[in-house]
Image (cartoon, helix red, strand yellow):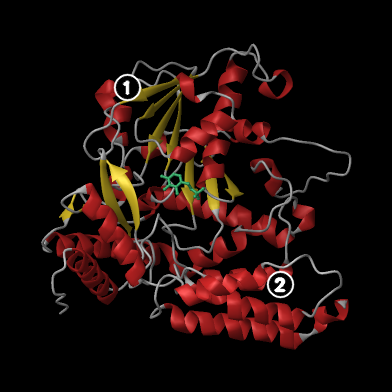
Amino acid sequence: MFSEIADRSLFEKVTSYGNDFIEKVFERHVAPLDKALEMLSAFDEDLPEKPGNSHEIIDLLQTKGAPNTMPHIGGRYFGFVTGGVVPAGLAAKGLASFWDQNSALQIMSPISSKLESVVQRWLVDLFGLPDKTVAGFVSGTSMANFCGLAAARYRILKRNHWDINEKGLFGAPKIRVVTGKHAHSTILKAISLVGLGKENIEWVDVDQQGRICVDKIPELDENTILILQAGNVNSGAFDDFETLFKEIPTNGAWVHIDGAFGLWAAGTERLQHLTKGFEQANSWAVDAHKTLNVPYDSGIVLCNDSEALTSAFHMNAGYIVTGQERDGMFFTPEMSRRSRAIELWATLKYLGRTGIDDMIFEMHQRAKQFAQLISKVDGFQVLNDVVFNQVIVQCESDELTDKTLKKIQELRDCWVGGSTWNGRKVIRISVCSWATTEKDIVRSINSFKQALDSIQDKKTKIN
Ligand SMILES: *Cc1c(COP(=O)(O)O)cnc(C)c1O
């Protein structure tokens, strides 16, 4: 059975199937067809009694699984905030799959340790963060937000002579949490996970675009965590870090920025005005799998207080051998982890500074193109200032918005999701793939028109 590991034809088959997928992904419909969804029942079987055949297993995935994927690596998937993949990163991840590295300790994977160190240095440099900033490589921004808040909790309590790791939270000095009313739901989850309690949040009003109102922020102190946002998940708006740090005394508060997709603006030439001043925070969360188009899953916590982050996640055991170089597990909650830094490194190395700027600015241009074209179509209205890659659109009534959205999803020319914005139902478009072309936008706009026309029972005109 295990001799199949040496079976080249198995792995060549995987490469060939993967290439078939990529060949079609830029042109195909962006959601599985009904007849594909029906095929999913092929997986409803009991756990087999005996070992099977690897080729048959891969064939089953190819025939019944591949048609049921969402092709977000193509150019017309605008759902949630979902990145595409830069080919060099996808290829590196493919190679690293064969290596199957565990990045817990340097001794367990020297290449992993090296690339984590290199990527940490590159990101600190790219974003212009303080030199002492360290990075932890986690599954996404949910986890990166959790890590940032865990570091904050450690540091604030430590200043109060309270070791959270030893004493726990019961009876601990109170930590205040201040954030804007549009904080992402994963921030709320992180607040729950670190035991700070959602009821304790001091909510701050936001403006029309979802930015925290700087003048409404309560007085801060050194027992407070202030959570800001680089990229509102609906509008794409950025909190005004520059004004905030200039006008509000932080008084030693810990500032965390959720920059899941927006923090990358700081790594560009042409959009870095959006993040101005953000480097004065203490911790930042960012996804590589969104705007940077690194394959899933890949998120990063950055923290200017190495001791707080590594103390929050410290653990020890008789068998742990710390290396001369970086041991990844001290920067993350997990011990064993796959080596995400490999494809992240490959993507950054491939793009370089100008490639990052070009790719992200192009997404911004395509979002603007979308907003311009859709606002000329009768029946659609754009609700946000398109400062980055997000566009929010509504029809005349919530009911019509819902129906149109459903129809667009059925047409499968592009995929967009719904959300709510200032109490109204909206359609949210997130341009987050390097692969999105001007033509993809035009084709998607036509699909929006067709959807609305078919609901309003008009004759569809596509030009
Ligand atoms: C996507 C997103 C998150 C969550 O990130 P995951 O990678 O899905 O865990 C958090 N905050 C914002 C603003 C996001 O867009």
154 or 45: nearer the eye?
Answer: 45
Residue on which disc 1 sits: 217
Give the side of residue 92 with respect to residue 188, left or right: right
Residue shown at the point (65%, 32%) measured from the top left: 312
If the image is split into quadrants, where does the N terminus sit? bottom right
Q: Amino acid at mark 1?
A: Ile
Residue shown at the point (47%, 48%) measured from the top left: 286
Compared to 237, does 194 lie above or below?
above
Give the side of residue 367 with respect to residue 116, left or right: left
104 or 126: nearer the eye?
Answer: 104
Give percent across and percent down for residue 353: 40, 62
Helix, strand or loop under label 2:
helix
If the image is split into quadrants, where does the C terminus sit? bottom left
In this orientation, does residue 414 appear?
A: no
Give percent across and percent down for residue 334: 69, 45
| First-in-chain label (1 vs 2) | 2
Helix, strand or loop under label 1:
loop
Compared to 262, does 87 lie above or below?
below
Give percent across and percent down for residue 56: 73, 82
Residue on which disc 2 sits: 98
